Amino acid sequence: MDMDIKNIEKLLEEKKYDEVRSIVNNIASSKMTDKETGAALTGIASAYLEISNSINARYLDVLQQAIEGMKKINNAENKSLESIKLSEIRGGLNK
């Protein structure tokens, strides 16, 4: 069996997962030599790592955005608290 790894990579980039699933199912159901089995397992491991890294990168981006949002909220809260304290001090001086 001859696998077209470049085609699978292209389909993955194009997010055509149903087509990739079909190719993988055809490969899995056919008889392969040890060398072909090794190549298939290597390809699957490579695809898994690529997908996992992509997910982790997206997670990191979202996490960094959340941290930035929390920093903005904290800054706004600190400014509000300072303003309240200043108002209280001014109010105390006016008595």
Image (spheres, grey):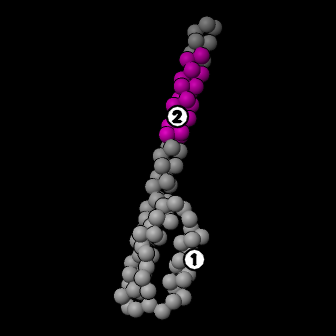
The answer to whether residue 10 is seen in the rendering is yes
Q: CA distance from mark 2 to mark 1?
A: 47 Å
Q: Secondary structure at mark 2?
A: helix
Q: Quadrant of residue 42?
A: bottom left
Instruction: Tell me the magenta residue range.
Output: 68-87
**What residue type is disc 1 on?**
Ser
Q: Residue at x 44, y 90 (%)?
A: 32
Residue picked out by circle 1:
22
Q: Position of residue 90 (x, y in %)?
A: 58, 12
Q: Residue at x 39, y 86 (%)?
A: 36
Left or right of 9 in this view: 76: right
Q: Residue at x 56, y 65 (%)?
A: 16
Left or right of 88 in this view: 42: left
**In the image, farthest residue toward the top:** 94
Q: Is residue 61 above or below residue 31?
A: above
Residue picked out by circle 2:
72
Q: Secondary structure at mark 1?
A: helix
